[in-house]
Image (cartoon, helix red, strand yellow):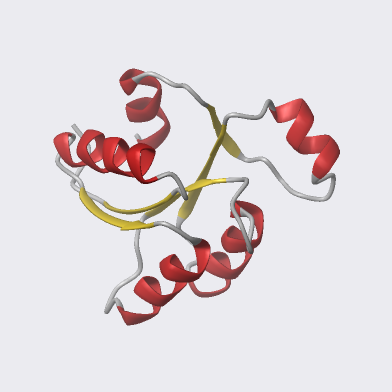
């Protein structure tokens, strides 16, 4: 297994966020959670070290996961970003044509798919 890593998980659905927190923590990783991009940015600003991975929903109120990732990468250029959404990559690409999908998890996804994306 990889070394324990710090992961920020952002999803505006509390039940999804809770499930992801439990799943990622069960892998032995340290987890930070936020229900919005703004909350995530506040938490990240207060941390004394960068997180290794940002795992974020794409479609959220006020700020998309793409916008969050762009702001996140300004201060964490070496960290990995994993996007997730219930919308298909094709739909997201048509709605957000200039955004790089990078690593992407299609909801619903399995524990294994999550683990493999984080690895």
Task: Answer with left or right where residue 113 lies relative to residue 21.
Answer: right
Provide residue 96's location: percent of width, then percent of height: 80, 46
**Res. 16 visible in picture:** yes
Picture residue at 65% right of the left edge, 54% below the top = 66
Quarter of image, res 26: top left
Quarter placement of the C terminus = top left
Count of all numbered marks drawn on residues in the image = 0
For residue 4, above or below residue 105: below
For residue 101, above or below residue 76: above
State the residue in front, 58 or 75: 58
Provide residue 45's location: percent of width, then percent of height: 39, 79
**Res. 77 visible in picture:** no
Quarter of image, res 102: top right
Picture residue at 58% right of the left edge, 29% below the top = 86
Provide residue 68's location: percent of width, then percent of height: 58, 62
State the residue in front, 76 or 72: 72
Picture residue at 71% right of the left edge, 46% below the top = 100
Quarter placement of the N terminus = top left
Provide residue 21's location: percent of width, then percent of height: 26, 43
Task: Answer with left or right where residue 25 lies relative to residue 51.
Answer: left
For residue 19, above or below residue 9: above
Task: Answer with left or right where residue 12 lies relative to residue 50.
Answer: right
Picture residue at 84% right of the left edge, 44% below the top = 97
């Amino acid at each position: 297994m990889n070394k324990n890593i710090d992961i920020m998980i952002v999803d505006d659905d509390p039940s999804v966020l809770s499930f992801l927190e439990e799943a990622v923590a069960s892998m032995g990783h340290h987890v930070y959670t936020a229900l919005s991009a703004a909350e995530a940015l506040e938490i990240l600003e207060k941390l004394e070290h960068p997180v290794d991975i940002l795992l974020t929903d794409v479609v959220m109120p006020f700020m998309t996961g793409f916008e969050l990732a762009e702001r996140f990468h300004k201060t964490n250029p070496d960290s990995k970003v994993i996007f997730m959404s219930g919308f298909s990559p094709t739909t997201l690409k048509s709605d957000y044509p200039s955004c790089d999908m990078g690593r992407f998890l299609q909801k619903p996804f399995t524990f294994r798919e999550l683990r493999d994306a984080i690895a």
